[in-house]
Image: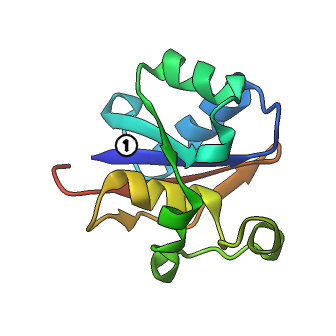
Amino acid sequence: MIVAGIGCRRGAPSDDIVSLIFAALSNFGIAHEDLIAIATETLKAEEQGLANAARFLSVPLVLCPLSDLGRVTDRIITHSLRVQAIKGVPSIAEASALVAAGHNARLLGARIVANNITCAIAIGEGS
């Protein structure tokens, strides 16, 4: 199970989100067809860019409560002081990917960043 975790500011365009997901998947030699979900924090539920990116990629948008993101901080690679101060977790993208990919998920590497969007790829059991 391959999941792309996304962190972004409000109003992030879906084209930028999709491009960053493709770049992250390519970094690990993963075809975009193998992606099973995009994940982010629950507070991004109304973000049209995320919803449109998920529709374009034909995958669900998984919304993760901050409390769940806090439970995987020991497995996060990248620590953003800004995100920690605002959200209480060190990385939205990495934590979301881990939560959505399941109990024994692991990150394939550190998140990547472009255009104020972050993307992390996690792999879970069943991949």
Residue 98 falls in which quadrant of the image?
Answer: bottom left
| Count of numbered tags | 1
Give the image location of residue 84, x and y in percent. Answer: 74, 73
Q: Tell me the residue at 41%/26% (across/down).
A: 59
Q: Is residue 84 above or below residue 92?
A: below
Looking at the picture, which amino acid does disc 1 mark?
Ile
Give the structural element (helix, strand or loop) at label 1: loop
Q: Is residue 72 above or below residue 43?
A: below
Q: Tell me the residue at 37%/43% (across/down).
A: 30
Q: Tell me the residue at 63%/34% (across/down).
A: 45
Q: Using residue 98 as the reference point, say whether residue 110 is left or right of it.
A: right
Give the image location of residue 8, x and y in percent. Answer: 74, 45
Residue farthest left in this picture: 126
Give the image location of residue 13, x and y in percent. Answer: 76, 26
Q: Using residue 44 as the reference point, say whether residue 77 is left or right of it.
A: left
* Residue 24 visible from this viewpoint: no
Residue 20 falls in which quadrant of the image?
Answer: top right
Q: Using residue 113 as the reference point, say whether residue 36 is left or right of it.
A: left
Q: Tell me the residue at 54%/54% (across/down).
A: 65
Residue holding disc 1: 30
